[in-house]
Image (cartoon, grey):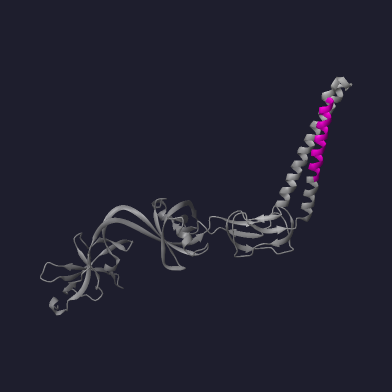
Amino acid sequence: MLSSAAFAQAPVQVEPVSDRTIVNQISVTGTVTSPRRAVLSTAVAGLVAELVIDEGHRVEIGEPLLRLDAELAQLALERAEAEVQQGEIAVDDAKRRFTEAEKVGAQRGVARTQIESLRSEVTSDEAALMAARAAAREQRAIVERHTLKAPFAGVISERNTELGEWVNPGDGLLELVATDNLRFDFRVGQENFSAISPDTPVEIAFDALPGRSIPARVDTIVPIKNPGARTFLVRVLADSADAGEALAITPGMSVRGRIQVDTGRRGITVSRDAILRFPDGRVTVWVIDDTGELPIVHERLVRTGFEFGGYIEVINGLAEDDLVVVRGNETLQEGQTVTILDGSR
């Protein structure tokens, strides 16, 4: 076996192993979803007279999207409003005659029966006026329902009608999808059900935005398993309300999540860069021996556990006071002398 002096001193960066809380990092894939999605239809039947928007248009709450031909409904409204005016005139006239009859009364020979009859006429005319006003309000509401308005802000994702088409209540004409306060839905294996709670932290990354990630939290756990895949739904929200909106993401995009489950125990961990894996299944690290004149390295077989946040749990093979090589460990040989670079921890 060659002595350590036979090898040139290799520059390496080292760091001590660390004792920390062990986290089980569950990697899952999911989908960006919208909190609101609605297929819109009109409340009345009619002919499509105007399409204000098209697919892809962004709309605000209450914004008109589509109008039906409301000519006949408008004429009916004008007739109802005219009947209200007639009713108001009739009530005023009945009240005037009743007041005059009651004022003169027996002095002018007006019978009490006639006065009570005029009182009843006032009551009847007032009831007729109330009915006319209700009919006018009903017709006004029908006219308003000829215009389809956005129930919430969002984007038109689908249009299923055209100008001149006759539509009926319940026909799906437009699909509206909200694009704010987006959610992230993941299917998680049933074995993790008891470990996940609303306090569980999550890190979200997007396939459409390489290198970008945001912190998030579990919002809802739907404890109904998919009987085929044996999974349940975990719905996640961004920690900041503005975080998702600041990114160019839309419902339907794929998303990757790393759910950080606290195992409730502590253990020895090393940086991911310290671990070397070989095709035969061996997992090793290089450990610094600085008891001599020059530091040398020894290869150490280890057994690993969970990987999380750039660290890997080492179940056995290392002690708390060990120094491991994290840079320059690819070509080291047993017993080789090394130079520890500045900046090592």
**At x 27% / y 56%, what residue is drawn?**
20
97 left or right of 159 in image: right
Residue reaching furthest to the left: 293
**Residue closest to the eye, 259 or 81:** 81
Residue reaching furthest to the top: 106
Q: What residue span does the magenta drawing correspond to?
A: 82-101
Is residue 98 within the magenta segment? yes
Is residue 182 within the magenta segment? no
Q: Find residue 129 and report its horizontal and vertical position in percent.
A: 78, 38
Q: Find residue 286 and report its horizontal and vertical position in percent.
A: 22, 69
Q: Quadrant of residue 279?
A: bottom left
Residue reaching furthest to the right: 109
**Residue closest to the eye, 320 or 316:** 320
Q: Quadrant of residue 239?
A: bottom left
- Please, is residue 121 above or below residue 22 in the view? above
- Please, is residue 142 above or below residue 161 in the view? above
131 left or right of 229 in image: right
Q: Quadrant of residue 50?
A: bottom right
Q: Find residue 203 and report its horizontal and vertical position in percent.
A: 40, 60
98 left or right of 49 in image: right
Q: Main secondary structure of the magenta part?
A: helix
**At x 78% / y 35%, what residue is drawn?**
127
**At x 88% / y 22%, what residue is drawn?**
108
